[in-house]
Amino acid sequence: MSLVTRGRTPTRVGTRGGRGQAQAEASASGVAPPPVGVGVAAPGDPRIDGILQMLEAMGNRMDQQAQNQAAAITAAVAATTVAAPVVAPAAAPVVAPVVAPAEVPPGDVVAGRPMHKLVEHFLKLNPPKFTGSGDPEAAILWTKGLEKAFALLMCTEVEKVALAVYQLEGNAEIWWEAARDTVFPEGVVPEWNAFLELFNDKYFSEAAREVKMVEFQRLRQGTMTVDQYEAKFTELSRYAVKLVKNPVNRVRRFRDGLRPELRSLLILLNLGNYNDLYKRVQMIERDQNERAAASGSRFGSNREGNRFGKKPMHGGRFHVPPNRKGGIGKSTPNQNGACRFCGRRHGTAPCHLRTGACYECGQQGHMARDCPRK
């Protein structure tokens, strides 16, 4: 380097060779030459050292975060590929909409059910009312009618009493207001049987029940049909429960009240089931009615034939009329060999009247008039 003087101001001029040599040396070392100028810190400046330390610390933190993220990703992948059996995600729970309960007036709930709704359904069944006047039989019919409605509505004990009281009118309502505290004092839960016992003591007394029991004991079929007799027997048996509680006694009493011509046939059958007895006597009655109707028309034609000296015929043979002294069901085997049950000649074949079979085909389950083979 040399100093060149131009005028009075000396100027330092580096030679071309010197500057080029310096740049070449910098390029060879891989370090850029420091800029030359005002305000540039020289190598070893403490400000540069602080910046470098800060950058180094930030780089270390970034490296640590990268390592942590890599470790987390590796663990997640391992969990999804080597995990226990995959469980299907649970369905989101269905939340039912919250419905506010209907407002019910105070004191209008019985056993957890709105009473006004129950009364509305109850009245649609047209239940009977009771005033406390009239035949004692009306009291029984009233309670039976209510119990039908109670069974349909599946009423509780409390509801039964409440609805029954709702149907009382006139003298019966006055009676209940006076007797209520006796049977259901404060704090006692109402029960239907307790109400029924008090009600029957008032409106269906012991004397009235005794009258009905005697009527049941004297019941006879008489001119009634079998169906009419059975209906009356069932109605009156409610007042004589002790007399028919035993199934054998029930069968015996029903059979003994039948007309003699029916009873004599059933005694020989010795049926022990009430329903079987009732069905069998129905079949016998229908058969006898059919035979009577057929005999009437046949005898009418025979009377016409007798005018010309003809003898009555039956099935191509001489007809032998039944023994009227013995009555229906009796037979005179020594005279005509007829069956003692049906009065017909069927030899050793089973008696269709006794077995309840059809006279046309011999099968059971239908009568001759309904036989499919006719």
Image (cartoon, helix red, strand yellow):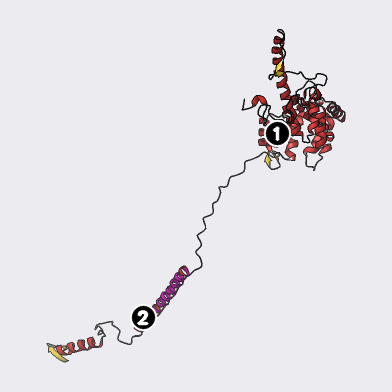
Q: Residue furthest top?
A: 307
Picture quarter with the C terminus: top right
Q: Quadrant of residue 246?
A: top right
Return the disc, 1 or 2, that comes first in the chain's sequence. Answer: 2
Q: From the image, tell me which residue sits under label 1.
A: 149
Three-letter residue code for mark 1: Ala
Q: Residue at x 81, y 31 (%)?
A: 267
| Horizontal side, residue 56 vs residue 101: left or right | left
- In the image, residue 220 above or below residue 310: below
Question: Dot 2: within a 10 Å radius of its alpha carbon, few (fewer than 14), some, or many (20 or more) residues?
Answer: few
Question: Dot 1: within a 10 Å radius of its alpha carbon, few (fewer than 14), some, or many (20 or more) residues?
Answer: many
Q: Is residue 66 magenta?
A: yes
Picture quarter with the N terminus: bottom left
Total marks shown come to 2
Q: Residue furthest left?
A: 7
Range of magenta residues: 59-79
Q: Quadrant of residue 371?
A: top right
Q: Residue at x 86, y 27 (%)?
A: 214
Q: Give the CA separation, mark 1 to mark 2.
A: 98 Å
Q: Nearer the viewer, mark 1 or mark 2?
A: 1
Chief SS of the magenta region: helix
Q: Quadrant of residue 182?
A: top right
- Kind of element beneath mark 1: helix
Q: Nearer the viewer, residue 177 or 353?
A: 353
- Residue 177 showing in the rendered view: no
- Residue 325 showing in the rendered view: yes
Q: Which mark is residue 226?
A: none
**Residue 149 point in image, percent of width and height:** 70, 33
Three-letter residue code for mark 2: Ile
Q: From the image, tell me which residue sits under label 2.
A: 51
- Kind of element beneath mark 2: helix
Whether label 1 touches label 2, CB < 8 Å: no
